[in-house]
Image (tube, rainbow, N blue to C red):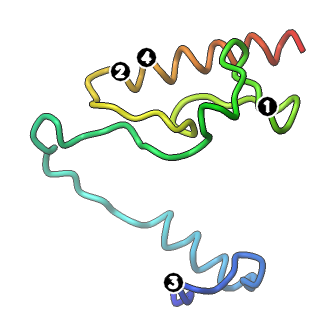
Amino acid sequence: SGIKADQKWAELSKNDLHSLTQQLHHCEIIVTGKGAFKEEFVTCGGIQADDIHWETMESRKVPGLYFAGEVLDVDGITGGFNFQSAWATGFVAGEAAGHA
């Protein structure tokens, strides 16, 4: 897209944004297979466990803000566990936010 790697998002011109969106929209990615077992992992990093009320998935730092899925600092071997974690935390967060 011609955008410099160190350029800040807020500094992008309309032409830069258009160029980037066109490149992303027309990008073709060919998947040829997957890695061997134990090479695929849930994304680690993210919102730390101590910063969440696990009963509701609400932020301890920002009341009314809920987290779920791979934005959480939870990692492990895939094989459905990441899906289960995303579904379970999403359900808990949705229920809690709906009753807030």
Above or below 11: residue 99: above
Q: Give the residue type at disc 2.
A: Phe
Q: Quadrant of residue 59?
A: top right
Q: Nearer the viewer, mark 3 or mark 4?
A: 4
Which tag, 3 or 4, sits closer to the chain's start? 3
Instruction: State the CA–CA distance, disc 3 to disc 4.
Output: 37 Å
In the rendered structure, find residue 81 and report the number of the disc placed on it. 2
Q: Nearer the viewer, residue 34 or 78?
A: 78
Residue on which disc 1 sits: 60
Q: Nearer the viewer, residue 21 or 12?
A: 12
Q: Give the residue type at disc 4.
A: Gln
Q: How many marks?
A: 4
Q: Residues within 10 Å of mark 1 (few under 14, many from 20)?
A: some
Decide if residue 67 is on the left or right side of residue 38.
right
In the rendered structure, find residue 1 and report the number of the disc placed on it. 3
Instruction: State the CA–CA distance, disc 1 to disc 2.
Output: 25 Å
